Amino acid sequence: MVSIHDVINELSDLKERNLFRSPPIVEAIGSKAIVNGKQKINFCTNDYLGLSSSRRVVAGTIQSLRTISQCSSRLVAGNSPILLELEQTIARHRKTEAGLLYPNGYMANLGLISTLSRNRATIFSDELNHASIIDACRLSRTNVKVFAHNDEEQLEKLLHSTRGDKIVITEGVFSMDGDLSKLDRICSISKNYDATLIVDDAHGDFVFGQPGSYAGIPEHFHVNERIDMSVSSLSKGLGCFGGYVACSNPIRELLINKSRQLIYTSALPEHLCVASLIAIPLALKGHLQKRLFRNIRLITKGLAALGFSIGKSASQIIPVMIGDEKKAVNFASGLTNNGIFVQAIRYPTVSKGNARIRLSITSDHTYTDIQVALNCFEYVGKRNGLI
Ligand SMILES: Cc1ncc(COP(=O)(O)O)c(C=O)c1O
């Protein structure tokens, strides 16, 4: 029997190490949030283009609502036409033969990676890859070689010394550091060693890329057609919900037949597919990305002027590096108490001693929101002895 005494000890240990989490009560709409009853400027949402609260997306989704869910797996209850329409739209967006929807991005990673590797291929994974990729590697029960973050030379050495089938996995925009994968180099090396390249671009999708398509980091580096398979989430740039794999027709069929994360769970509900179908054309217009990148420039410049380090961030994910867990927790609560809703990101999400405040910038933030945030960073930062 699990001892409650042991559970309480484990929780105390987390508290002592400043690693305990207790999320506040939050009602968020766009860039504003009511946190424990008080209005704050919200820097915690991945709704980078503000589409989650777009009137057109919300109204269209409500209008489409006939049932809450199919209440069954696609393999039992069949494919809804709306789901297939979204999969075809995704395939066009990613310029692949096919798309396949999963209930979320986490499950898309588990499904694709574990089905594809199946005890036979060696996986090469960037050390900063997201937890869902790490869990997918574990579930694969195969040989996994982790390369240092964005270190294409080490990746090449590892590929060179490995026989058999190879799969390279990287993110596009790294979720906790906001830097970009060196995808052009990683792509060339993967091709040289005949490795399958999977890119999880959950944070770059619909944000980066060419105006009109915004196909993320692969497009940013002009290697879109050379990526073998993509994984993404619909709950970030697109502001909706769900996850997808973009791939060839045979891989799609393999996943439908073998991926337990697709077979043994209920399908993504139709109304959530409708939400994405309405949001995609809005995301492709480009005006939201323009506002977003203006905001990124403003806050990046302002934080640097105050003397904060934001690591190698080159995107809307801006980590304000603190290091010590306790200092990060105190800073986050000071900022939140002063009207700026942020979280301290700590171990195990990042390595020990690398705690940070992770800012998610959105196109919904106004010029004033950014100025208020910078003033607050200065005030609380000085009071906490950080600058
Ligand atoms: C890189 C990356 N991949 C996948 C996911 C999971 O996506 P979802 O929230 O749709 O499960 C996340 C979520 O934060 C992520 O950062």
Image: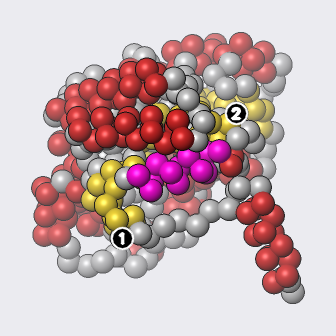
Q: Is residue 261 in view? A: yes
- Please check the rendered image and state whether residue 100 is part of the magenta-colored stretch, yes or no: no
**Is the CB–ligand 1 distance for label 2 below 8 Å?**
no
| Disc 1 from disc 2: Cα separation | 39 Å
Numbered tag placed on residue 37 in the rendering: 1
Q: Which quadrant of the structure image shows residue 188?
A: top right
Q: Which quadrant of the structure image shows residue 36?
A: bottom left
Q: Position of residue 85 (x, y in %)?
A: 25, 53
**Would you name the residue on which mark 2 appears?**
127
Q: Is residue 154 above or below residue 44?
A: above
Mark nearer the viewer, 1 or 2: 1
Q: Residue at x 23, y 56 (%)?
A: 53
Q: Is residue 209 in view? A: no
Magenta stretch, overall SS: helix
Q: Which quadrant of the structure image shows residue 359?
A: top left
Q: Which residues are magenta?
A: 327-338
Residue ranking furthest to the bottom: 1
| Mark 2 neighbour class, 10 Å CA radius: few under 14, some 14 to 19, many 20 or more | some
Check disc 1 and report its element: helix, strand or loop: loop
